[in-house]
Amino acid sequence: MNPHHLHFRAAGPQDLAAFERIAAASATGITTLPADSAALRDKLERSAQAFASSDDSSGEEIYLFVVEDLGAPDGPRVVGTSGIAASAGFADRFYSYRNEMVVHASRELATSNRIHTLHLCHDLTGHTLLTSFYIEPAYEHTLAPQLLSRGRLLFIAEFPKSFSDRIAAESPGLSDDSGRCPFWDAVGRRFFDMDYPQVERLTGGRNKAFIAELMPQSPIYVPLLPEDAQWAIGQLHPVGELPFAILLDEGFDTETYVDIFDGGPTVDGRVAMLKSVAGSRRCVLGDVLADIPGDTDAAGDGPWHLISNTTRQNFSAVLRRAAPEGERMTLDAPALDRLAAQPGQAVRAASLDEAVA
Amino acid sequence: MKAALVRPATPADLAAVSTWTGQTGTLPAAADETLLVAQAAGPDDEPAVLLGALRLRQAVGMALPRVWYHVGCTVHAASELGLFHRQRTLMLGHDHTGASELADIAWARQDTALSDQATTLQLLVQAALLVIASHRAQYAERLITELPGPRDSAGQSPFWQGLGRHFFSGDPQAAAHAHGPAWRTHVSALLPRQPVYTSFLPASAQAAIAQVHPDALLLREVLEQAGLRYSHHVNVEDAGPVLEASTDDLESVRRVRRWTVAEAAQEGTTVFLVLAEGPGGAWRVVRLRAHAQGSTLAVSAEALHALGVAAGALVWAAALGGETG
């Protein structure tokens, strides 16, 4: 796989088949991509409208992206998806459990006790939410997931007015193949006689606030939960490890919030502090490079960079090796073609760590 | 052996009291407490046989805060999902602060018929209510009694095992021994301040809530006969129920009146509980048969002797409805 062939771009109605394929493949984890053609078509239409509109953000917008491998053996193929919801819990509340420690102390009994509690909260309501991440297993160990996850941050950096200055992302919590979820069994199930997958189906496409209102409103004293449920708090389902690692590298914080259903970690942060946002810069395109870049191993000219165009409707990004500094950037003809950009126009660039690349 | 008399305890009584409670009996330390003892009828020149004791408190939790869990209910319902869940909650609080209390009720059980135990308990409880009625202004609007909850043979409470232990890892019995009744106040600083859904507790702990230790079932029955009721509070240690009442709603308080005693040739036909005051604030409560006429209570010479007063003395008394001596 040659990273030069990867193309990150705004998804459109033409990607429905790819989204259907991915929704079916991702049995666990992406509740924002239901395996339901009508719902997916609706989401793609909403996304296309959001990209097309330069109106002030209402918060309702969702943005879906794909990474396409233009060099795939059988022709161009969408190999991953990612998304952004402009405002978490739009028009309703976005529920999370917030980890809090309380210390109870008695001088007379000469003892104090640090107790982990979970508080149902709306803290993340209105945060921008990263959603819908999926990468085909064959591409997990390439640069594709980096482009897929961080490319959307360049979009946010370019169009900050469409988003909150705070951002969050949910990750799937622990559950087994039969859908048994220790956190749900210890908490949610006491309030709904339902298995976790059943609840996910119920909430599929709907705002989770509907269910959250039925959860206990007072804090949960974690020591009262069974051990496997205690252990599951903030634990990640293995399918979420790759996107989670990218978010942590970006600087998201994972200490504060967990999902109210499965106890999976919900990361949060300030947009301006994220590595790909803070480290991104605008450059002006120089003359077209004569050379067409070769394969991965080719000694390039500097570290790998995410390079995006600055247009809303046809937002695109590619991976190229480039000089780490400087306000000028020269790109090869295929890159300019994918970015639909001309010499003299602006692009946004952010470098990838060597460790990541 | 049947109880015949209730009076304030003296230091000489404490040894007997401590054999029932398993603890060292202490005379009231606080000014607002009275320790009542019930004793059997017997010749004056023989030492009294004690049958039971009760500590009457004017107001609880005014110096040392007292805590209880309020057992509440919250409903989680969603008609569109066909869900209706009733959840019990426990909320730590000081709800009964200021109430009067019938506390530390202890009585002789060994070699004592259950019916005789019941008589002793009835006499103790009725006498306490008579004391309250005769000094009504000193006692509160509400009256409570704590009953012990279930424990295993080692003294472990399933409720504590399911809840308290997660918040205080020490041994509650050792702490209770070291700190006395104040230990519950101390431990309350460690207990959950937010409502706890009981469904998070093990089944054994849930089942123990508001249950009475088998040893206290008779006492519960006697207190309920007197008009006290469980109304959704339990103690924080073993979840034994708090029985409570509005003091003035209790028949045994409401019916108490001031009478003048007179000597009659014959014993009356109605059973009365009579509180007679002697010199220096001494008092005793005697169950006797009397004949009531106007505001005069005619009793036998023997009864006058038992009361320790002369004809013409003022007493507090009420007829015991439905009971026979």
Image: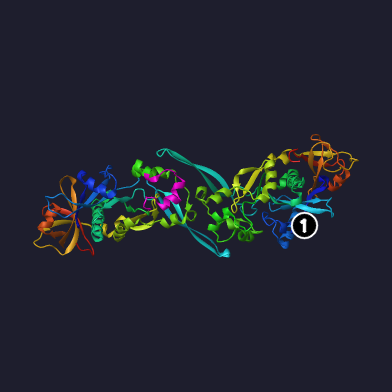
The amino acid on which the numbered mark 1 sits, given as a three-letter code, is Ala
Q: Position of residue B208 (x, y in %)?
A: 41, 56
Disc 1: which residue: A18
Q: Nearer the viewer, residue A313 or B296?
A: A313
Q: Does residue B43 belong to the magenta stretch?
A: no
* Along the line of sight, the residue nearer the viewer: A60 or A218: A218
Query: Residue B39: percent from the left, percent from the top?
Result: 19, 53
- Does residue A80 lie above or below A350 as drawn? below
Task: Give the residue displayed 53% in from the left and 57% down from the top.
Answer: A190
Q: Is residue B182 left or right of residue B197?
A: left
Report the magenta residues as a range: B151-173
Is residue B136 visible in the rendered structure shown here? yes
The residue at 64%/42% (across/down) is A253
Magenta run includes residue B163: yes
Quarter the N terminus of chain B occupies: bottom left
| Position in image of residue B207 (x %, y %) | 43, 57
